[in-house]
Amino acid sequence: MGHPSMPYLFSALVGVATVAVSLLSARRRLRTAEDRIASAAARRQAQVERLKRLARATLDQARDLRAARRRKDSIDLACEELEQRLAAAGAVDRRVYVLDDRRTPADAGWVVTVAHADYGARVTGGLEKTVLEKTARERWKRGRRFLVWGLDEAKAREKTNARYPEHKGFSILSVKPYLD
């Protein structure tokens, strides 16, 4: 028979080889697990960064939306004011202009309505009309009211004709007593 320690030695070598193979396999699995953990951590960090970017973008969009709503509200308010001004411009003109304030104690007040069908056409003939010019022309067409001081209706007409003569296209629509 052979040397008695040979089977022990062979068993020991097989045991050492098995342990070495097991250690290498365990080390490979450990390296694979470490790589997977590192990859998962990198993916997690990338997701965190992406979520931060999306949250920042969402906050920026919310801020932009609030600013746009404020701008819209101010524009709506400006439109409303403009519509009111346009409605007021189209409304009946209740103004009374004072032709002159010179009077004697015997003079009475008269409200004289003067119109001009084509006021301003000679001056601004071919030019583009602004809203104010159009409004002024419309007021002259409808008639402007003037407070005129005179002894009687005839004197009030005379003063008005001196300032707004008929040969220049003006016409007196009405003369009424002025009631304070």
Image: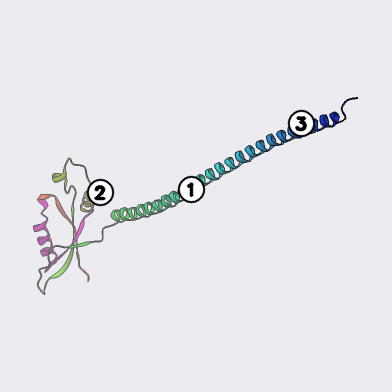
Question: Pointer 2: what residue?
Answer: 131
Image position of 62 with respect to 113: above or below = above
Looking at the rendering, which quadrant does residue 127 occupy? top left
- What amino acid is at disc 2? Val
Residue that badge 3 annotates? 17
- Disc 2 secondary structure class: helix
Q: Looking at the picture, tell me which residue is in the foreground, 59 or 161.
A: 59
Q: Nearer the viewer, residue 45 or 34?
A: 34
Q: Nearer the viewer, mark 1 or mark 2?
A: 1
State yes or no: residue 17 in magenta.
Answer: no
How many labels sit on residues? 3
Earlier residue among tags 3 and 1: 3
The furthest residue to the top: 1
Q: In what quadrant of the picture does the N terminus appear?
A: top right
Q: Earlier in the sequence, mark 2 or mark 3?
A: 3
Q: Which quarter of the image is occupied by the C terminus?
A: bottom left
The region drawn magenta spans 142-166
